[in-house]
Structure formats: C-alpha cells, structure tokens
Amino acid sequence: MNHELKTIQDTMLAKFKVDIDLDKCTKCRRCAVNCTYDCIKWDKDEKKPYVSKDSNCVACQRCTVFCPVDAITVRNHPGTYSPHANWTTYYHRVIYENARTGRVLLTGMGCDQPKPSVFDNLVWDACQVTNPAIDALREPVETVTFLGKKIDRLDVKDMKKGYEVEDIPPNVRMSMPLFIGHMSLGSLSYNAYISMIRAAEKVGTLMGTGEGGLHVSLRPYKANIVSEVASGRFGVGPDYLDVAALEIKIGQGAKPGHGGQLPGEKVNEMIADTRGIPEGTDALSPNPQHDIYSIEDLKTLIAALHEATDYKVPVGVKIAAVNNAPAIASGIVHANADFITIDGLRGGTGAAPRVVRDNTGIPIELAVAATDRHLTRQGIRHKVTLVAGGSLRSSADLVKMLALGADCGMISTSVLMAMGCTVCQQCHRGQCSWGIATGRPDLGKRVDVEWATQRVVNLFNAWHAELEEVLGIMGIDAVESFIGNRGRLRYIGPNPHEAQILGVKHAGE
Ligand code: SF4
Ligand code: SF4
Ligand code: SF4
C-alpha cells in the first residue's frame, strides 16, 4: 500500500476556489497569461486553460476582470475547518504557516483583522431651519489647505501696504486637505509610481516618495513631492531635498517600531541608482533612526534639514499611532517640526510581519483626537499641521478625521485601488498581477500610465466634490473652519468611553 507522505503545506485548505466555465470559454488564453501566481495555466495539448491548484490563488481577480466572456469565477473555498470560536481559520493558517516555514510570516497591505472602525461609529449633523445650508454646486466652499507651521500672530509691517506680514514659516499650498502618502519606488513599479505623481500634480496636491529616493526622471515634479528621510537614508542628497516638503519617518502605522527591507533581487539598476546603493544588494532600513534617541536629537535633524533647504521647505515628522502619540507629538512640536503625520493601525505597507501588522498600534481616529486635544491644551496646536492617515476609505472618513482634529488626510491604499489593486495582500511577493507592487518590468507595464493617472485624478476630484457637498450641508464655507469641529459629529457606537476619548457627544445629546 502506498502511503503518500503529505507536507503540512499540502494539508492546508485552499482559501479560494477557481472555476472556469469551458462552455463559455473562447480559449483566448488571457487568464493564463494574466495569472502570476501559477493558479490558472494553459494546457498546450488541449489548448484550453485549466486550474492547476486552487491553493495558489490569492483572489487578485485579474483573470476574472480580463476574461472577455465572464467565464471565470473566484470565490471563497467552500471547504472549511470544523468551526471553532477560538481556533478560527485565521489561527489555523498562521500556525500551519509557522510550522511549515519556521519563520516570521510576512504579509502586505494593512491589518485585515476585524478591529472595530471608529469612523463607522460616527455621523455628522446637517443644517435645518435656523442655520442655512450652503449649496456647494452654486456657492463657493473653500478647500485649500496649507502644509506647514502656522504663525503665532500677524505682525503688520506697514499699515499702508495692507496685510504684509513678516516671518511666515514655509507652507505648501494644496487644493484640498488630502495628499498621497509615502510609497517607495521599488516596492511599487515605475508606472504606478509616476502615475501617482502625475495625478498629484494635476490635482494640485502632494505625494510622498517613501523611503526609496527620487528617481532623476521624477525631478520635474518636485513641487508636488514630499521627500521621506527614513532610517536607511536612501537617496538623500541635495536634489532629494529640493522638493515641496520633507518628512522624517520615525514610524509607520502598519508596522510601528519596524524598519523596512527591499530584497536584493528587486534592486535593479534603476532602483540602485535611485537609492544610491549597489545593484543587487538588500536595501535595509533599520528599525530606529540611529542618530535619534531623544527629542533633542530630532531637533538637531530638523534644524539640519531646515538649514540645508534655506528654511524654505516645511519639515515634518511621521509617527505611528501608538498609545503615547499625543506626548510624542508634543515633543515633536518642541523639536520645531512644521507638520506631524500620524499613521494609524490599519495603514498599508508593502511588507510587514503579520504578527506586528495585526496587533500593534491604535486606530487613527483615537490617536488624532487625543493628539489634537493634547496639543490644544498645551497651547501649541497651531504650531504644526496635523496630517492623519491609516485607512481613510472614503471622503466620509476624511470628513470625520478633519472634525476630530486633523488638518489634512493622506491616502495610499485607496490610491492603489484606484489603479486596479484588489487588496489581495500579496505586495511582499513582488509578483503583483496588476503591475503595481512589483519590480518586474514585464508586470509593471500592465499599468497604463495615462489610464492610471486619470483614475487617481478622478478619485481626488470625487472626494473633493463630496467634501464640498458635506461641508455645504453643514453650512460651512471653508474647510479650515471645520478642523477639530467635534460639535458637528455624534457618536452612535456601543462604547461611551470611546466617545469620551474622541470628545464627541452621543447621538441625542
Ligand atoms: S489571476 Fe488571481 S484570481 Fe485569477 S486564478 Fe490567478 S491568483 Fe486567482
Ligand atoms: S480568459 Fe476567459 S475566455 Fe480567455 S481562455 Fe481564460 S476563461 Fe477562456
Ligand atoms: S498592490 Fe498588487 S499585490 Fe498588493 S494588494 Fe494590491 S493587487 Fe495585491
């Protein structure tokens, strides 16, 4: 009797089930070409597609979208482990993978666990009889936002000349309170990257470089770039600093306390050139910034960046949303930063240890509300622009974020989704079937730059119009007067203590 010895990987149930309706199929072969995960293959002899292994499927849905006759269905696999309230399928998979690999499990994108979304527990009010609404289609609603330190007071130099003031700190103008967060070239394809930068320019907003440097071909877009100064210091030089704004990265919402790594096989000639490292070497960013161990150290680096840019560029600091974010933010203000970015628990990433991604940090809503209140009580809130990110899923989340105290939001996953990303969480594998999170030039070409640019522009335009619409129904004609306006929010969730931390009254109050 032949007893086949199965590996533990073989005994793990497939997550997804792929079916091809061969009666509908026209044998065009697109699905086999599009699937980068060796799930759908082409049978050369029979000249038809076949599913080689359901367990290879990651539900990226590339095959289904590109099948011209809708012949493919990808769904949750009907096979299931015995239901158990404690040993859920999540823990089955984690333990089997731990046992198979003996390693830290990596994953991409933001936390996929059902952590409660505080945004979903909030609603805003609307004008009724005594406070008139604004018709945003016919009346102006100002959405222009400035990134940078606000002045303490207006010092009018010469009354005859009007409102000329002195000593205005550097500020960058954005058409709306939203920009594209930091994602690096290398973790993303060149086509995806340049599409986002072009979109930022068209919209009149900004995009973060991520920690991967700025390729020479992207320098014409410098007025729309926020360069990241991360622990690896990749590509940091005079050209890299000659941009709209600089941001020192201390932490990231998806992996607080963790650095980054781009494996050597992804470091091709262009990436090596951009990052200023030899081709084929691992690009490692250490967990801490090795020259920052105190607020004084941070102050020194901020001063150095101010000096290097002739005090013309706002310098910010990005931290992950953790328990003591308000106290850290206060220190950052005292270190003379011009803006603070807080990145929340559900923020995305190209690669993170699953155990870190799914269990570290706090939701951005609570972190921002607490930080805004802390800085206000200390009388230093106006000294920085407060930027918040970490899974803003819609213009509604943005509106609530502003009311909780952020001056501005930043989005990344939603931008990738606008370009086709299906949040399959495989970014760390570098074989993104949509051509987005990959260093492979053959896959990167799948992103059509014109199309992707327009999609991202459309996303921003849609959120902009919706923001105007919502401010209008609340009778607010300028976004600036809405920042921190918790009085317009009401809490409808189950936890009064949460409402208290947010500083928002319960519905009916
Ligand atoms: S293309 Fe994506 S969804 Fe389709 S079979 Fe391959 S992995 Fe699954
Ligand atoms: S893409 Fe659709 S029509 Fe083309 S081979 Fe695959 S299943 Fe058949
Ligand atoms: S970027 Fe690509 S690999 Fe990453 S989640 Fe989106 S579709 Fe998947």
Image (spheres, rainbow, N blue to C red):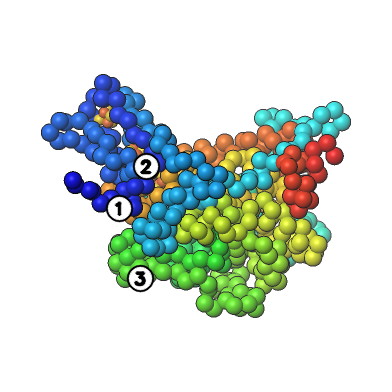
Name the kind of residue labelled 3 in the image: Ile
Q: Position of residue 192 (x, y in %)?
A: 40, 48
Residue sitting nearer the eye, 494 or 423: 494
Q: Position of residue 224 (x, y in %)?
A: 52, 54
Q: Which label was assigned to residue 7? A: 1
| Ligand 3 contact, mark 3 (Cβ < 8 Å) | no
Marks 1/2 in contact by CB < 8 Å: the verdict is no
In which quadrant is the C terminus drawn?
A: top right
Q: Earlier in the sequence, mark 1 or mark 2?
A: 1
- Few, some or many residues within 10 Å of mark 3 (<14, 14–19, 20+): some
Name the kind of residue labelled 2 in the image: Ala
What's the CA distance linking mark 3 and mark 2?
40 Å
What's the CA distance linking mark 3 and mark 1?
40 Å
Residue that protrudes farthest toward the right in the picture: 130
Q: Which label was assigned to residue 14? A: 2
- Up-down relation of residue 388 to residue 37 (above or below): below
Q: Which label was assigned to residue 277? A: 3
Q: Residue at x 56, y 51 (%)?
A: 346
- Up-down relation of residue 277 to residue 147 (above or below): below
Judged left or right of residue 216, residue 343 is right
Is residue 161 in sight in this rendering? no
Judged left or right of residue 189, residue 304 is right
- Few, some or many residues within 10 Å of mark 1 (<14, 14–19, 20+): few
Q: Residue at x 51, y 46 (%)?
A: 88
What's the CA distance linking mark 1 and mark 2?
14 Å
Q: Residue at x 60, y 59 (%)?
A: 361
Can you tell which of label 3 and label 1 is closer to the viewer?
Answer: 1
Looking at the rendering, which quadrant does residue 54 occupy?
top left
- Up-down relation of residue 502 to residue 83 (above or below): below
- Up-down relation of residue 491 to residue 181 (above or below): above
